[in-house]
Image (cartoon, helix red, strand yellow):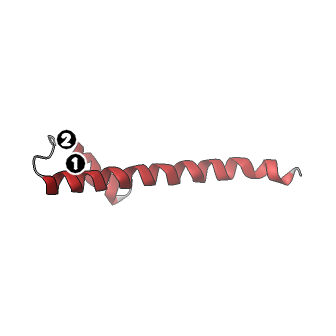
Amino acid sequence: MDPFDSLVELIEGKSKPKNKKEKRKWREIEQYKEKKELERELEFYDGSLEHLLEDY
C-alpha cells in the first residue's frame, strides 16, 4: 500500500468537511484516488490483452 492510500484511509474515517477549503482538498483526494484506480486497471488490462496482439 502506498503512503497516499494510508492517508486516504485515515481521512475516510473523518466526518464531511465543513468549509470550502476542506471540501476542495477532499475533492482533490477523491480525484487522485480515482486516477490511481484507473492506472491500476489499465496496467491490468494492458498485460492481459498483449497476448491477443501477438496472434495477429
Q: In the drawing, does residue 47 fall left or right of residue 38?
A: right
Residue drawn at 59 percent across, 53 percent down: 43
- The residue sitting at 81% across, 52% down in the picture is 53
Q: Percent from the top left, x then y, of residue 29? A: 30, 54
* Mark 1 surroundings: few (<14), some (14-19) or many (≥20) residues within 10 A: few
Image location (x, y in percent) of residue 28: 30, 56
State whether residue 35 is above or below residue 16: below
Label 1 with label 2: CB-CB less than 8 Å: yes
**What element does badge 2 sit on?**
loop
Q: Which residue is mark 1?
A: 10
> Which label was assigned to residue 36?
none
- Residue 11 pos. (x, y %): 21, 48
Q: Which residue type does callout 1 highlight?
A: Leu
Q: Residue at x 10, y 46 (%)?
A: 18
Rendered residue at 22%/55% (across/down) = 24
In the foreground, 25 or 45: 25
Residue 15 x/y as whole percent: 14, 40
Left or right of 14? Residue 3 is right
Q: Residue 28 versus residue 39: which sits nearer the camera?
A: 28
Q: Nearer the viewer, residue 43 or 35?
A: 35
Q: CA distance from mark 1 to mark 2?
A: 6 Å
Residue extending farthest right: 56
Identify the residue at the far left of this view: 18
Q: Nearer the viewer, residue 16 or 45?
A: 16
Q: Amino acid at mark 2?
A: Gly
Number of marks drawn: 2
* Farthest residue, direction front: 20
Left of 43 or right of it: where is 23?
Answer: left
The label on residue 13 is 2
Mark 2 Cα within 10 Å, few/some/many (few <14, many 20+)? few
Instruction: Determine the secondary structure under disc 1.
Output: helix
